[in-house]
Image (spheres, rainbow, N blue to C red):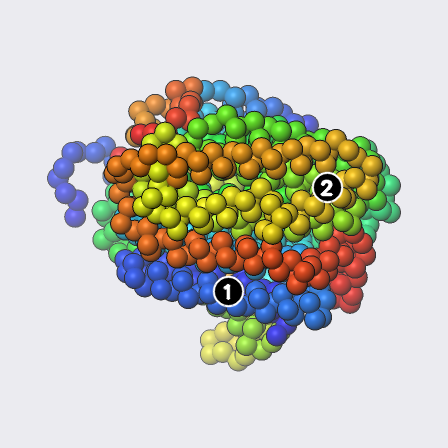
């Protein structure tokens, strides 16, 4: 199969289109999207092993040879990310079937989710910078639909702001691509990477690097550009929030990872130290936010920001070990954030509100929920047997090796405070005197908890089986450390 | 044909002009669509021109009239177009060549003589439907609530 | 051309910073126009024949920026339309088009 890297994009696309014909039959929508996402997982799993066996796979769309046509490139990093994304979307779809009201599901919900999957998988896979912009727009437009579904006044208000921020960052993205095209004259990322070394124009390259940082930073919520995130992410229902929190910011992070390793790898200097500084500031701001709020949703939302900071710190150090840590932590964080959001979603469903004040003593009635949350929380903070630990360990070691002591210290201190903030949800939500709850989804807990527990199990397996995962991660990092692997695979002969 | 509701101030010239201008625009759209073969034109432009004709009807008469003339659900039109486009592109999968690779050949057609037919044209047909569908959906959504 | 793009961006920033949501939408429209103009400029304003098959033409314009701009225009067209619908819905629900009155993240309603 030549087209294998394409399939994780094509299957959801076809599903989304097909579902548009059956907007009235809800059961049809559910079954079709459930099965097709399962198929996507299967295909992306196969893709991962295929990449493991054969190295980087490429497809040139329309058979135009590599630097001219659009190329899709599946290296290990994007294959792993695609697999994780498909897994998450699968669990979220499963979860939303019972969580969301029927009214909500009926209104293009599944179609939007499928198109979101198309966009995110596409952005991870594409090897063409403008094509990446197009896929960004695909998932952004679906996210606009998802954030406004439900049509509560607060949702409308926040989605206006969300839309404005993203429209501006898209315009900046187009401008950045224009500048890049203006000086290099190609859009293929491998080709750019090859030619960028030859032209020797450090001034304009720094401008482009900063513009990329702004564009992806707005998507990924790094330090000065995170302002829109807490407000906008507060309003959609939790399954949607799980998708956003786990996927959308991570695509921004992936963008930074890809462009900085491919384009700007030979001028480690001011830009990378700027990135490092911003990453640390992001961690600090995120931790402060997480500690200050008394709302379960908000605590997790600020934890997204912390995680983005940790990953970017790993990226900015740019040594092999720290990059391995960053990739490891990236995958871990996608899984665990989604799991936590789904768990907190159940708690909100029980209590009827996301305020910690309205919760308490849930462990009595819902012990399973409580202990699952406990494991997920430990895993987020990076307590040894679980998956967050290895990623953080590698990032910290990489940082120390590079001669930096402040960064690793902040990363370590942040994990302690993160633990405190998520434990606050545990302590206030599950301990204490039980209250009488009025949430409308109390009776659904049994059905909701099944996908959540499975997801948490996967994250635990990911942590415990780190030894088995390690070779995959190592292979994923290879092209990041040495871009020539990537370049050769893409341009090998078209 | 029009209901005697609130008397609106549409002028006769616009209404009667619309009735035949629309067809000219439609024809032009079809021309543009086929011109996209080797010269400027194509599904996107054709779709936009078509929807401009529909918008003209909308302006001269009203939404109800448009519904009577063309009783489509424009969301369905979008879906059909997307399906055509995606299926055409993924037809390449069956022959195990990269996605989007297009095939073409020359055929003797009655009336036209020797013509080249491309699979790219099927894709363009999909694009055409998508553009018409999306444009009309947007305009109707904004216009309907007044 | 670069200056024109700059002026467009300037107007866009001014409009986006104003309070009325409609002005903001027009501002985003202008901003994306500026971006498209930059793509065209950066692609090089060469004068050549249209990049389609024709006899006896040796000098072509670079078709890539045009393709990019077309794509970008379509996308910004769609997003702007969505933005307008959303703004209209918000106006109906919230009874205001003033962004100042849409402050706050307290969403327990």
Q: Residue at x 50, y 64 (%)?
A: A40
Q: Are marks 1 and 2 on the same chain?
A: yes
Q: Residue at x 73, y 54 (%)?
A: A477
Q: Which disc is residue A396 wearing? A: 2
In this view, A324 is above or below C30: below
Residue A426 or A159: which is nearer the viewer?
Answer: A426
Q: Which disc is residue A40 wearing? A: 1
Q: Residues within 10 Å of mark 1 (few under 14, many from 20)?
A: many
Point out the tag, 1 or 2, that comes first from the N-terminus.
1
Q: Residue at x 78, y 50 (%)?
A: A320
Residue B129 shows up from this direction: no
Q: Residue at x 60, y 40 (%)?
A: A307
Left or right: A72 with respect to C106?
A: right
Protein chain holding label 1? A
Mark 1 vs mark 2: give the one in front.
2
Residue extending farthest left: B4
Based on the displayed image, in which of its 4 quarters is residue B84 positioned? bottom left
Image coordinates of residue A292 in percent, x first then y, are 50, 25
Contact, CB < 8 Å: mark 1 with mark 2?
no
């Amino acid at each position: 199969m030549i087209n294998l890297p394409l399939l994780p994009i094509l299957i959801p696309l076809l599903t989304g289109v097909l579902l548009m014909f059956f907007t009235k039959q809800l059961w049809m929508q559910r079954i079709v999207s459930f099965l097709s996402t399962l198929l996507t997982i299967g295909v992306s799993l196969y893709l991962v092993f295929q990449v493991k066996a054969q190295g980087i796979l490429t497809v040139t769309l329309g058979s135009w040879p590599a630097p001219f046509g659009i190329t899709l490139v599946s290296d290990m990093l994007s294959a792993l990310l695609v697999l994780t994304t498909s897994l998450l979307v699968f669990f979220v779809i499963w979860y939303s079937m019972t969580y969301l009201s029927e009214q909500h599901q009926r209104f293009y919900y599944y179609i939007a989710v499928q198109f979101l999957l198309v966009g995110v998988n596409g952005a991870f896979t594409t090897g063409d910078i403008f094509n990446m912009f197009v896929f960004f727009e695909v998932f952004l437009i679906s996210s606009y639909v998802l954030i406004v579904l439900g049509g509560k006044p607060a949702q409308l208000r926040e989605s206006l702001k969300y839309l404005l921020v993203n429209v501006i960052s898209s315009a900046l993205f187009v401008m950045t691509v224009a500048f890049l095209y203006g000086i290099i004259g190609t859009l293929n990322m491998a080709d750019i990477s090859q030619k960028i070394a030859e032209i020797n124009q450090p001034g304009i390259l720094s401008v482009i690097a900063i513009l990329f940082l702004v564009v992806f930073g707005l998507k990924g919520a790094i330090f000065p550009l995170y302002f829109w995130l807490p407000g906008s992410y507060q309003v959609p229902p939790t399954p949607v929030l799980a998708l956003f929190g786990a996927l959308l910011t991570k695509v921004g992070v992936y963008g930074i990872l890809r462009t900085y390793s491919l384009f700007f790898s030979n001028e480690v200097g001011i830009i990378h130290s700027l990135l490092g500084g911003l990453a640390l500031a992001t961690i600090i701001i995120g931790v402060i936010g997480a500690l200050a709020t008394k709302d379960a949703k908000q605590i997790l939302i600020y934890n997204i920001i912390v995680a983005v900071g940790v990953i970017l710190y790993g990226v900015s150090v740019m040594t092999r070990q720290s990059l391995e840590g960053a990739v490891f932590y990236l995958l871990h964080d996608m899984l665990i954030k989604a799991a936590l959001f789904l768990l907190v979603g159940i708690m909100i469903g029980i209590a009827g509100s996301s305020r910690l004040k309205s919760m308490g003593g849930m462990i009595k009635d819902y012990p399973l929920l409580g202990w699952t949350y406990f494991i997920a929380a430990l895993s987020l903070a990076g307590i040894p047997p679980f998956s967050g630990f290895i990623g953080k360990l590698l990032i910290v070691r990489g940082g120390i090796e590079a001669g930096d002591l402040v960064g690793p210290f902040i990363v370590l201190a942040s994990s302690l405070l993160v633990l405190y903030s998520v434990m606050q949800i545990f302590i206030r939500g599950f301990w204490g005197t039980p209250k009488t709850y009025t949430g409308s989804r109390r009776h659904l807990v049994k059905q909701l908890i099944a996908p959540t527990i499975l997801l948490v199990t996967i994250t635990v397996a990911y942590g415990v089986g780190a030894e088995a995962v390690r070779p995959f991660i190592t292979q994923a990092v290879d092209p990041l450390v040495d871009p020539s692997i990537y370049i050769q695979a893409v341009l090998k002969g078209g | 044909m029009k209901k005697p509701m609130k008397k609106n101030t549409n002028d006769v010239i616009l209404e009667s002009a619309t009735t035949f201008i629309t067809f000219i625009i439609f024809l032009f759209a079809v021309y543009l669509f086929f011109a996209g073969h080797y010269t400027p034109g194509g599904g996107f432009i054709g779709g936009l021109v078509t929807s401009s004709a529909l918008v003209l009807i909308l302006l001269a008469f009203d939404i109800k009239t448009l519904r009577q003339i063309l009783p489509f659900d424009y969301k369905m039109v979008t879906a059909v177009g997307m399906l055509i486009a995606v299926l055409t592109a993924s037809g390449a999968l069956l022959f195990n060549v990269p996605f989007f690779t297009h095939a073409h050949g020359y055929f003797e057609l009655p009336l036209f003589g020797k013509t080249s037919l491309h699979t790219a044209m099927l894709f363009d047909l999909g694009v055409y439907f998508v553009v018409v569908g999306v444009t009309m959906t947007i305009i109707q959504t904004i216009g309907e609530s007044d | 051309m670069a200056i024109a793009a700059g002026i467009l961006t300037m107007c866009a920033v001014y409009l986006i910073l104003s309070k009325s949501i409609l002005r903001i939408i027009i501002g985003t429209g202008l901003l994306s126009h500026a971006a498209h103009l930059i793509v065209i400029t950066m692609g090089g304003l060469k004068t050549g024949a249209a990049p389609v098959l024709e006899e006896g033409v040796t000098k072509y314009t670079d078709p890539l920026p045009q393709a990019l701009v077309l794509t970008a225009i379509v996308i910004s067209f769609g997003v702007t339309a969505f933005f307008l619908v959303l703004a209209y819905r918000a106006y109906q629900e919230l009874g205001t088009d003033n962004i100042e009155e849409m402050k706050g993240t307290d969403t327990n309603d």
